[in-house]
Amino acid sequence: MLDRKHFRKDSQPVVRWIDQYLKEIHRYPVKSQVKPGNIKNQIPLKMPEKGEDISTILRDFENVILPGITHWQHPNFHAYFNANNSTESILAEMITAALGSQCMIWETSPAAAELEERMMDWFKHALGLPAQWEGVIQDTASTATLCALLTAREVSTGWTANEDGVPNNLRVYCSTETHSSIEKAVAIAGIGRKNVVKVATDTQHRMDPKALEKAVRMDLSAGKKPIAVVATLGSTGLMAIDSLEDIGPVCRKYGLWLHVDAAYAGSALILPEFKWMLDGVSQADSFVFNPHKWLFTNFDCSAYYIKNPGYLIRTFEILPEYLKTGTRGQVNDYRDWGIQLGRRFRALKLWFVLRSYGLSGLRETLRHHIKLSQEFVKWIESNQHLELIAKPVLNYSCFRYNPAGKELPPDTLNRLNQELIRKINASGEAFLSHTRVDDKFVIRVLIGQTYVEEKDVTTLIQLISRMLETMEIE
Ligand SMILES: *Cc1c(COP(=O)(O)O)cnc(C)c1O
């Protein structure tokens, strides 16, 4: 066991290791290359009887654990959506761990509750969300969306579902491009997965508001009870931006809760040139975006906003004797604003990041990423063997290999692209992920790691070029 008196000395090797790691991150394969079981088989089945030396533990961390890490902070991490950190957020997390606060109610750390309230206000103004909305930090967008649907369920059943159980005729609408977390939330909320209605999309992959209204009317005439619509700003597959201006009126007309999932693209709302995505947002009831994706605040940190926090609290409030306090009503007790009782102090890392970057620093970094992505798109367009798929949005693009003059059948093209991405990811030089568009296997590229530079985009371009040369067509 470590003696707490020697913290300064004991922490030095760790701090040195972090510094070295971040400096030399290019040395590591972006995507871990281990096979299933490789790591587990090196870890003893039982915990040690006698305590071990911290230097031994650190050595094993490097030798056993590190090979099984995919390096999300590598500038050539272009898969899924980024989960960025920054020096600021690493430092704040160290302090958060040192404080070790459990921030369930105001009294268990007043500063945590009040800083959280202010950080949510800062974002509300920076993004341009309606002034009367209030925010709360959740762990993930999945949890925030579950909170939204549970609240919608309570409001629409006249606050009876929590008490009596869930009626089996409730319906929730989203588009065919919607994230899987919506279906999962509907299932967990007891509404039933079969009551998710996937509405068709238009040519820009946005939810078609006419198809939405038609689906709602059909359900009403069949005795179902439509309760909520989930719109997406920045879908996972193709970065589609649903029109809140078009969907909002349908929700108002039929009294449906409108939840906006802006998990990824919401960060770009700090840029005036993307504020158009919010047109019509005043008709929404709730909204979520993830600073842990593209705002340099390490996982997890998701910002959830709600037009009427009273509804949220009424859905989740539970008051056992041991949690009754004299400050109730004067302060925010965030345990009533979500699912779990215990809460981490997540506002501190936001405070560090937002103050150190400032709004202008955040804007500059996002614009830099968008510019790098546009350069990458130019290269794709200039390569006759590559086909740009869907419109590039923000720092996202999507392409596939389609060798010029070959007219290959769809299945062959899909197989070739699977092979191409496998080779790219096996190289360890970059990590890309894929999606399917109209049955085409396509490769997604996000250029958005906190410290990504022009030279990293050059590395990516050279890597793809090299792998294209190794592709064998039959
Ligand atoms: C990332 C993402 C999610 C899921 O986010 P978590 O915070 O991991 O739950 C949901 N919806 C969209 C559109 C996303 O991009």
Image: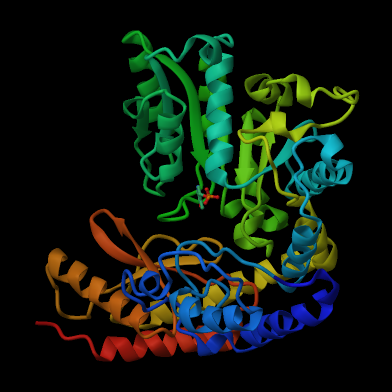
As drawn, the residue found furthest toward the left would be: 474
Left or right: where 322 falls relative to 400: right
Left or right: where 266 falls relative to 212: right
Q: Quadrant of residue 187?
A: top left
Residue 112 percent location from the top left of the image: 83, 46
Which quadrant of the rendered structure holds the C terminus?
bottom left
Q: Quadrant of residue 431?
A: bottom left
Q: Residue at x 71, y 48 (%)?
A: 344
Q: Tell how many labels.
A: 0
In the image, 35 versus 89, the foreground residue is: 35
Res. 390 in view: yes
Residue 442 percent location from the top left of the image: 31, 65
Residue 376 percent location from the top left of the image: 48, 78
In the image, 400 versus 163, the foreground residue is: 163
Res. 280 in view: no
Q: Is residue 80 above or below residue 334?
A: below
Residue 52 percent location from the top left of the image: 60, 76
Q: Residue at x 30, y 81 (%)?
A: 423
Which quadrant of the rendered structure holds the N terminus?
bottom right
Q: Quadrant of residue 379?
A: bottom left
Which color scheme did the rendering employ for the protein?
rainbow
Q: Residue at x 45, y 64 (%)?
A: 46
Q: Residue at x 46, y 13 (%)?
A: 165
Left or right: where 98 falls relative to 204: right
Q: Is residue 315 above or below residue 439?
A: above
Q: Is residue 218 above or below residue 457?
A: above
